[in-house]
Image (tube, rainbow, N blue to C red):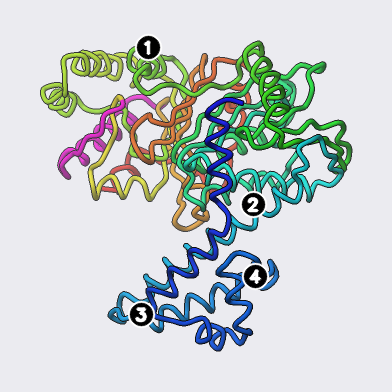
Amino acid sequence: MDESFTMITEKRCDMKNQFGKSLRSQMEKAGIKESELADALSYDATYISKWINGSKLPSERNAERIIGQMADCFAAHTNVPEAERAAQRQQGLAELKMAYASDRSYLIFQNYNNNDMSFVDSRQTLVRLTRAAFMQALDLYDGRIGIMATFDLFRLYGKEFRGLMKELHDTGVKKVELSLALEPEGLTTEYNYYAAVIIGTIGSFDYIEMSIVCRRPEQPSILVINDLLCLQVLWSVGGELSAVFSMEHKIISRFASVCQQVMEVGDKLLDPAEPESLRRTNVQLDSYSDRRQWQFFNEPPAMLFPGEIMDILIEHAEDESYARYLVKLNNVFAKRTCKARIDLVLYSSMLNEYLANGNISVGNVSHHLTPEQTRLHLTHLSQVMSEYPDVRLYVIRDTVVLSEEPRRAPSIFLDTYSLNIENSKKKPNDNYHISLAPRMRGAFEQFFEKMLRMPFCNRLTAEDVLRYL
């Protein structure tokens, strides 16, 4: 047995009774005895004692209500100013909920774990088991989740996949590594579904590394989550499925090896890109040089700067390498980008934010422009649109038409050769994905063209752009 697995096993044993520890800690801070909490909850004091020592948990049906009442009770007894009480209650509530979810997932895992292969024939059980594995991984691996699937994970879990990803997001997961295999034909026939689920998944997390390869018909359908769970889908038809699974380390290792082989030999459909490699390989320069571009910015539009601004950025470049990159970028903007056929989509609110704060990323580096510079940038963009009608700008009026969810979508950059997806919530290009696969690029082109025809996506004239100023 390897040393890393021994450490994880020991840590797993220490995970018991997170709820009881959190409950005791908050009771001590509030100066509340077991009998006082029991009275506040209208429960017998023996229940409180069992929750604290870990011999029992509140039932799933009543847990949310009980934990809410606990948070109310602790906040009421805490000696803090009234203005701070609501925030302290929310923090205590979140800690208790997270501890409860951890203990509940631990129990689920222990109930299923028989150190051998087991059988599951219900989608509900599969989702429940997957959720428990995610929660265990969050505790055991410091908020890092590793998921490998040699099949279409999106379709197997259906709408539940979106729910699982949201739950992971809400827990504050630090990093997700997701590797899966897709039938390439589906990217052509169901382009809208796959493009939406891919950008939705990437946009859900601050840091995710998603790798997608082509699936071959003869390959088994295997799922591995960290080294906690492996399963093989035997069949899945019309919403029904059957699968075998295991939590035995030796079995998981063998299944993980098969998954790794599939990912290594499969034709690449999408890959994460290292931030430091993007400028070195001139990915953005190549895209901006192309004769046909589709650009969706969920951030300020780092393109078509006027020469005055580029000169300032070059003069204050952090190093010589970045200065050379900016010089090349300036030449591309002036000679190629402004004359290309471009469909540029921006969120209306993002334009307003950019004018207000001046924050923008250029070639992986964050910059802050003055109000005069941001106005000059958009004025120049308007001038380019007037001179070159093939440069088209669309805005999505997200503050009126759309919910907050689409705002989490990453930026999408397409040219005639490649697809680039960037989620720059934390740091420019720290969450970047690239595809050179024609089918993947084609799926996103159709997705983009469909978006341009949607009623919430409105084309602006050059004069319309100036109205933002």
Report the amino acid beneath label 1.
Thr
Nearer the observer, 389 or 457: 457
Q: Residue at x 47, y 79 (%)?
A: 72
Q: Residue at x 12, y 26 (%)?
A: 316
Residue on which the image places disc 4 = 58
Tell me: 91 left or right of 240.
left
Closer to the N terminus: mark 4 or mark 3? 4
Residue on which the image places disc 2 = 106
Closer to the N terminus: mark 2 or mark 4? 4
Report the amino acid beneath label 3.
Thr
Residue 452 in sight here: no
Closer to the N terminus: mark 2 or mark 1? 2
- Give percent across and percent down for residue 464: 35, 44
Q: Residue at x 48, y 19 (%)?
A: 415
Query: In the rendered view, would you say 212 is above or below 101?
Result: above
Q: Is residue 388 magenta?
A: yes
Residue 360 in sight here: yes
Q: Nearer the viewer, mark 1 or mark 3?
A: 3
Q: Do tag 4 and tag 3 residues touch (Cβ < 8 Å)? A: no
Report the amino acid beneath label 2.
Tyr
Q: Residue at x 48, y 24 (%)?
A: 420
Query: In the rendered view, would you say 298 is above or below 220?
Result: below
- Give percent across and percent down for residue 153: 70, 34
**Residues rendered magenta in the picture:** 364-389
Determine crowd level at label 3: few under 14, some 14-19, many 20+ residues with C-alpha closer than 10 A.
some
Q: Which mark is residue 78?
A: 3
Residue on which the image places disc 1 = 281
Label 1 – label 4 distance at C-alpha: 55 Å
Tell me: 437 left or right of 247.
left
The tally of labels here is: 4
